[in-house]
Image: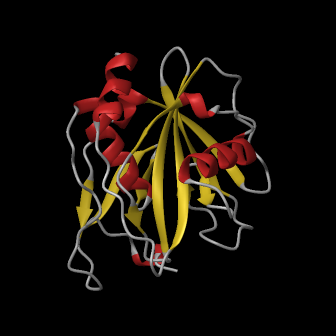
Amino acid sequence: MDVDAVLANVRAFRPTPLPAEGFRRAAVALAVAGDRPAIWLTRRTSELRAHPGQFALPGGRLDPGEDAVDAARRELGEELGVVADRSSLVGTLDDYATRSGYVITPVVFALGEVPPPVPNPAEVAEVYTIPLADLDVEPRYLRIPESEHPVIQLPLVGSLIHAPTAAVLYQFREVALHGRATPVAHLEQPVFAWR
């Protein structure tokens, strides 16, 4: 996998922002790291109030005065102990509105060689290092009676990842690995993620 080409594809992408009215802002980090480039995916602890036990990218809501890049950098540090300088920013993907009331901005960083992540046990039950080539999987789509839009699932880490994380990872795959500006805002979340 040519990491320079991957990063060039992200830099060339023009993301679609969403208005924040009626939503809270959040950001997630797609941190491309290592000599064999990979990103980190987490499983949230079962003790967390929001979305316990679900797969997620490092991230969370924006604090006052933060933009999406600052929030993604902070959350990467808080959840995994990984430092990302603002200079490591590559770009962002399309905003994704969740059923739980957030507009998420995915932020892509290029970190190169960094120490292994140290998960914060209060937030992260498990951390997975996913080589970029492993993201090149075909999604599955389900229909649910509650929505006219398809629910996306990605088969990764021996499980099925759902939106919003699956939607973000799928767009990252399309943009970074294939240079395709594939929209994902219409892809639905499973009902269990709506709260």
* Quarter of image, res 147: bottom left
Q: Residue at x 57, y 28 (%)?
A: 87
Whether residue 87 is visible to the viewer of this picture, yes or no, is yes
Residue that sits furthest to the front in the current view: 65
Quarter of the image with the N terminus is top left
Instruction: Name above or below for residue 145 compared with residue 8.
Output: below
* Quarter of image, res 140: bottom left
155 or 181, which is in the foreground?
A: 181
User: How many numbered circles are shown?
Assistant: 0
Picture coordinates of residue 117, whole percent (x, y): 70, 33
Q: How is the image coloured?
A: secondary structure
Picture coordinates of residue 152, whole percent (x, y): 30, 60
Q: Is residue 111 left or right of residue 173?
A: right
Whether residue 1 is visible to the viewer of this picture, yes or no, is no
Residue that sits furthest to the bottom in the current view: 146
149 or 104, which is in the foreground?
A: 104
Q: Residue at x 37, y 17 (%)?
A: 4
Q: Is residue 38 left or right of residue 171?
A: right
Q: Residue at x 36, y 59 (%)?
A: 17
Picture coordinates of residue 61, whole percent (x, y): 61, 63
* Quarter of image, res 21: bottom left
Picture coordinates of residue 178, whole percent (x, y): 23, 32
Instruction: Name above or below for residue 123 compared with residue 50.
Output: above
180 or 151, which is in the foreground?
A: 180
Instruction: Name above or below for residue 89 compared with residue 104.
Output: above
